[in-house]
Amino acid sequence: MQDSVALLYLDANATTPLRPQARQAMLAAMDRIGNPSSIHGCGQQARAMVEAARAQVAALAGVCAEQVVFTSGATEANAMALLGFPGRPRIVSAVEHPCVLAQAAREAHFDSPAYGPAYGPAYRPAHGPVQMPIHVVVAVDADGVIDLAALERALAATDRPALVSVMAANNETGVVQPVVQAAGLAHACGALFHCDAVQAAGRLPLAPLAAVADLLTLSAHKLGGPAGVGALILRPGLVPAPVLRGGGQELRRRAGTENVIGIAGFGAAAAACADGGDEPARLAAMRDRLERLVRAVTPGVRVFGAGVERVANTCCLALPGRDASLEVIAFDLAGIALSAGAACAGGRPEPSHVLAAMGVDAATAGAALRISFGWHNTEADVDRFLGVWTARAYRRQSAAPVSFRAEVWFSTGLFPAGPFPGGPFPAGSFPVNSFPAHSLSGHLSLRPDAGSDAGPES
């Protein structure tokens, strides 16, 4: 990214900026000394901070504080859930986070006809019991929603109670899964139900999810807290076999000295989310406006999951013929951070298993970009994204000016020598190359002018 360009961060599904409340809580914790397991005064002060944060996380999820087990992050929490009940077959959806898929596959019968070399094929038993592998992947439809009928058949095929894991919202597409229905199917067959709610926290109500899940995973840095801390919420009385053994921390459910500073930030961020008011509605309006105007500028764009419920902040789209990795670089050079997929892929340009499970062809999947808003984003950020998107859509027409019609107005800076700064911009035309893309600000809505013979590249 160029140092001279102010950063616009549109990758909240990868991580969010630290909320001011979390920062303050962490700074306060840094001024304390003491191990929460110590019985002296310093230790008890540290313990009080941990328990206060536990109560804040519990309040966000609508559960009792005793149900919250702090971990080093969502990956560890998911491992605790998936590995904590040996002997149970593991049934997961095809679009789960890689850390869920990887843990579910541990010790699986890789030579089973129901299990392929990577994450599938999806398990769709037509009828009757079959030999049950430890790891079963259930298909999703074209929108990325789990096939509940296939899940029901997979559960019926088990010869012993299973463990089912279905995420609340997908990290790539934002698609919301039918968690309540899936949990009902699981419980009807005596199975335990785990829900990875990392992308739902602060974007969907957690209490309905926690009410039906035996195990629920959260992560601090996806809701404005620090990285390196998460939680597994357990149904009362449920005790998974610990993944980490040693001390008696977290009521002997997770060994290791608690990360007091990180946990304090987690609690403060959870409290801020609980007080967030209409933030999901605000983010949904921004996302819907972005998608509407992107479609106007580039009619060939595809928005994944647009026909089903999604979390408010997430847009995953593809313009066929584009290379997502090159687009990410171009946006980064313009000062905008977004993603070509899940950041947890470690920067490797691997095909999305989520889009593949949805039946998306490799070329279209290779063009997919993810824009994910956070608590820090505003409508002006949508305008700036649209300015860069529009300029890139018309970049092959750069030799000849392309006319646009301004539907709303610009707030600052586009025409410093003209009559329009700070006020309404009347309907009219201007050349797309007459301004740098990163200078766009305010409320912007662009369409190709009807009189222009140039069009967006396909």
Image (cartoon, helix red, strand yellow):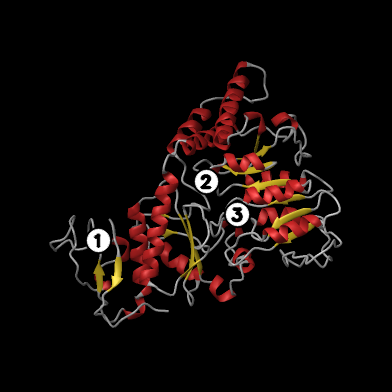
Q: Which amino acid does label 3 sit on?
A: Gln
Q: In this view, does 267 lie above or below 148?
A: above
How packed mark 3 is, by other alpha carbons closer than 10 Å (few <14, some 14-19, many 20 or more), is many
Q: In this view, does 403 lie to the left or right of 190?
A: left
Which percent across, then down, holds residue 333? 40, 64
Which percent across, then down, holds residue 12? 48, 51
Q: In this view, does 320 lie above or below 341?
A: below
Q: What residue type is labelled 1?
A: Val
Which percent across, then down, holds residue 242? 77, 39
Q: Is residue 386 visible?
A: yes
Residue to which mark 1 is pinned: 408
Say which element carries label 2.
loop
Say which element carries label 3.
loop
Task: Kindly indicate the quadrant of the structure image that contains residue 244.
Answer: top right
Residue to which mark 2 is pinned: 204
Q: Earlier in the sequence, mark 3 or mark 2?
A: 3
Q: How far is the residue under mark 3 from the one under mark 2?
A: 12 Å
Q: Nearer the viewer, residue 193 or 85?
A: 193
Q: Is residue 341 left or right of residue 297?
A: right
How packed mark 1 is, by other alpha carbons closer than 10 Å (few <14, some 14-19, many 20 or more), is some
Residue plotted at (34% across, 60% down): 384
Q: Earlier in the sequence, mark 1 or mark 3?
A: 3
Quarter of the picture holding the C terminus:
bottom left
Question: Are discs 1 and 3 less than 8 Å apart at CB?
Answer: no
Q: Which of marks 2 and 1 is nearer the N terminus?
A: 2
Say which element carries label 1.
loop
Residue plotted at (29% across, 81% down): 399
Residue to which mark 3 is pinned: 177
